[in-house]
Amino acid sequence: MIQLGIETLLKEQVNLLKGQRVGLLTNTTGLDSRFRSTIDLLNADPAIYLTALFGPEHGIRGDGREGAAINSGTDPVTGLPVYSLYGETRKPTPAMLEQVDCVVVDLQDIGVRYYTFISTLSLVMEACMENSKSVIVLDRPNPIGGVTREGNLIEKPLASFVGMHPIPNRHGLTIGELAQVYKFEFGLDCPLTVVPMAGWNRSMYFHETGLSWVQPSPNSTGEDMALLYPGMCLIEGTTLSEGRGTTRPFEVVGAPYIDSTHLAREFNRLGLPGVLARPTSFVPSYSKFEGKLCRGIQIHITDRKIVQSYKTGLSVLGLIASMYPTDFTFRGDDERCMFNLLAGTMRLRRMVLANDFGSFFDECQEVCGAFSRKVAPYLLYQVQGGAF
């Protein structure tokens, strides 16, 4: 089993926090390998002065629905103030940081650009830079590995909370490595310390860590969901159901008008690596098509090491758009509609409608190669066998 950043901190680097008023950005994933809460561990340590808690999307206890505003308040266990960074503000205010010298960050990212925890990290670093505070990131695994990168970069006019910086959809970094990229490449020049893991290597997927999956958010159901998310999340920008309100969000896609057998057959004919589709049906308990029977497919991973998750998701969308041109639609038509914000480019929408991606995926490979060279100085872990 690997040693998490929180465990490294308490075993070897607790002096980082001595004499500091500590704020903690965390949620239900802030745990050590024995499921002890980072909140409780820091609050119980007499050498650490914990003064405030900060919560990302879904709240510090992880019970808020996606997109739902979370109120600030008081933690009933510790009595500490809890400042929501997904409510009236998404960036800590000077008042929130008044009783804080450093902000410790302990969050489980899932390795994908859209996931808003890494946007919250960015805004925390920006606020700390502006208010002369420091940031300490307790590192955690990238659950879908640190070798493969997929996708395109965000174009500046489409920067948003689901894509603040020009990083690929599947970024291949840990949250600690991302923090270093934010500081040294994107100008968030706050005092930064990353407390590393021990025993993690870049080729590991989450099931290889020896850790148990704790859902970072209500629809982050496991490693397969996370691996498909770089492509399947784009479904959120359409009127198709991405499976919210089911037990398999982002693994299924459907709508009442789809012939599931036909769609599965056409998808499998594409021969995409590491995945197969199975006809399925489902009734979402909330979100799109709530209470209505949807037909579609479930994407099953047959070999996670070769899955091209971004291409998989876009191929699903292109197929459905071509098979059901009068039914398939995007959510919104303006330039900053949800699909464009997720995609990070306005040209991808046209490709989906035409079911023709041309040289786009080859271009993505070149972009990811350049990104890999840019971030190489900030990598903290090797691949199995010793090379980066």
Image: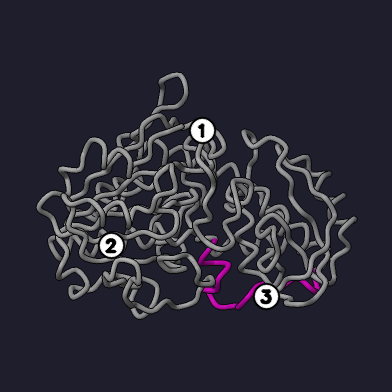
Residues under labels 1 and 2: Cα distance? 28 Å
Disc 1, SS: loop
Name the quadrant containing residue 177.
Answer: top left
Q: In this rendering, which labeled residue sits more in front, label 3 or label 2?
A: 3
Q: How busy is the neighbourhood of tag 1: few (under 14 within 10 Å), some, or many (20 plus)?
A: some
The image's mark for residue 124 is 2
Residue kind at label 2, given as amino acid type? Val
- Residue 176 at x, y = what percent? 33, 45
- Residue 190 at x, y = what percent? 19, 54
Q: How busy is the neighbourhood of tag 2: few (under 14 within 10 Å), some, or many (20 plus)?
A: many
User: Image quadrant for the C terminus?
Assistant: top left
Residue depicted at 54% across the width and 65% down the height: 346
Residue kind at label 1, given as amino acid type? Met
For disc 3, the marked residue is 286
Disc nearer the start of the sequence (3/2): 2
Number of labels in the image equals: 3
Disc nearer the start of the sequence (1/3): 1
Say left or right for 162 vs 55.
right
Residues under labels 1 and 3: Cα distance? 34 Å
Say left or right for 368 vs 327.
left
- Residue 262 at x, y = what percent? 89, 56
Disc 3, SS: loop
The image's mark for residue 204 is 1
Q: How busy is the neighbourhood of tag 3: few (under 14 within 10 Å), some, or many (20 plus)?
A: few
Name the quadrant containing residue 104.
Answer: bottom left
- Residue 170 at x, y = what percent? 51, 47
